[in-house]
Amino acid sequence: MKIYFIGQKGIPAKSGGVEKYVEALATNFVQNGQEVFVYTRPHYTNKKLTEYQGVKLISRPSCPTKNLDTFTHTLISAIDVLFRRADIVHFQAIGPASLIWIVKIFKPKTKVIFTFHCQDYYHQKWGWFARFYLRLGEVVGCRLADEVIVVSHNLADYVAQKYGREAKYIPNGVMITDKSVNSNILSQLGLEPQGYILAVTRLVKHKGLHYLIEAFHKLDSDSKLVIVGDGAHTDDYVNQLIELSQADPRIIFAGERSGNDLAQLFRGAKLFVQPSESEGLSIALLEAMAYGVPVLVSDIPGNLEAIGDYGWSFRSGDVNDLTAKLKECLDNPDQASQFIKAAQQRVETEYNWHDITNRTLQIYGLSQT
């Protein structure tokens, strides 16, 4: 079976939940014996790279601006796939889903799948027209796709209530780097194991990092705060975060990290914090749980669904409550240890790629070998 992925920036994943999702699914499908193609953007994946772990990469251009990057790349990819033999075309996220109609009209025998990752129109970086277009993409995806996959139960309920159709719940999963790998990232950043709080996210406003920085200022602790990630056409917000942090030398911006460096940062963290105001199902949060890091999250549905009963939460957007919960987490190592073991088991049971791959192949009309 020939399977094409459209909507992601590319693989191998450097950052981004969608990219990690596509990389894991695509490589697992290849191991299952499928022929898999992933469309990539030249500013994310080197266009000279034509194959990755058996996945065939198709580089197509885009207009790499905040508002046009995804639209132009998806448009070119959707037209390109019309001239290829494809059994499955799998669109990612509500923005790219707006162009599902191209494949449905001009390639009607090809099965179209749409994964609904997140209600992106709640993200504060978008202007009114972009939010309108993202909502339109949600409508098109949920109405026209042959099958809709959602990554959380909350989104499944939303699709059922708004569109009157059953979406298939298949969550994100976690890929953990082997524990034998080494990295000197901690010494490079002047960190000691168990000596810092970690946040791993894009530096965009709806991720709530300004709340975390303000709360951390009020925390009487020798621990450092390490923020891993880069902006996404959000220079003003990045500058705001840097300005908020200037007076506190405990705060470290580590930039984008992946692979062994990111694995070591997870393993050495005393606490992982996710203060976001909007999420689908965060892979970074699942990774923290899998690496054995206690977690503190904002009390939005996507975060609470992920941690179950095995982590702390605070009122989203409430700096004082976040400060109090940070102190509670750091002052209760025994409770943290109990959460760690249960959370790791939860990830292994609920969010493993073997099951996710099998369930996705079943939606395609296949069974895993």
Image: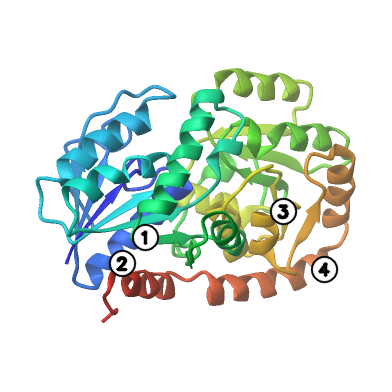
What amino acid type is highlighted by mark number 4? Gln
Residue 284 horizontal side relative to residue 355, left or right: right
Name the quadrant containing residue 342: bottom right
Measuring 55% from the left and 19% from the top, which residue is drawn there? 235
Q: Earlier in the sequence, mark 1 or mark 4?
A: 1
Looking at the image, is mark 3 or mark 1 nearer the viewer? Answer: 1
Q: Earlier in the sequence, mark 3 or mark 2?
A: 2
* Mark sitting on residue 271: 3
Looking at the image, is mark 3 or mark 2 nearer the viewer? Answer: 2
Measuring 23% from the left and 29% from the top, which residue is drawn there? 61
What amino acid type is highlighted by mark number 1? Ala
157 to 216, vertically: above or below: below
Callout 2: helix, strand or loop?
Answer: helix
State how far apart marks 1 and 4 are (Cα): 32 Å
Tell me if mark 3 has few (under 14), some (14-19) or many (20+) residues whose alpha carbon lies within 10 angstroms of its own.
Answer: many
* Mark sitting on residue 24: 1
Looking at the image, is mark 2 or mark 4 nearer the viewer? Answer: 2
What amino acid type is highlighted by mark number 2? Asn
* Mark sitting on residue 335: 4
Residue 342 horizontal side relative to residue 318, left or right: left
In which quadrant is the C terminus drawn? bottom left
- Contact check, label 1 and label 2, Cβ < 8 Å: yes
What amino acid type is highlighted by mark number 3? Leu
Name the quadrant containing residue 1: bottom left
Callout 3: helix, strand or loop?
Answer: strand
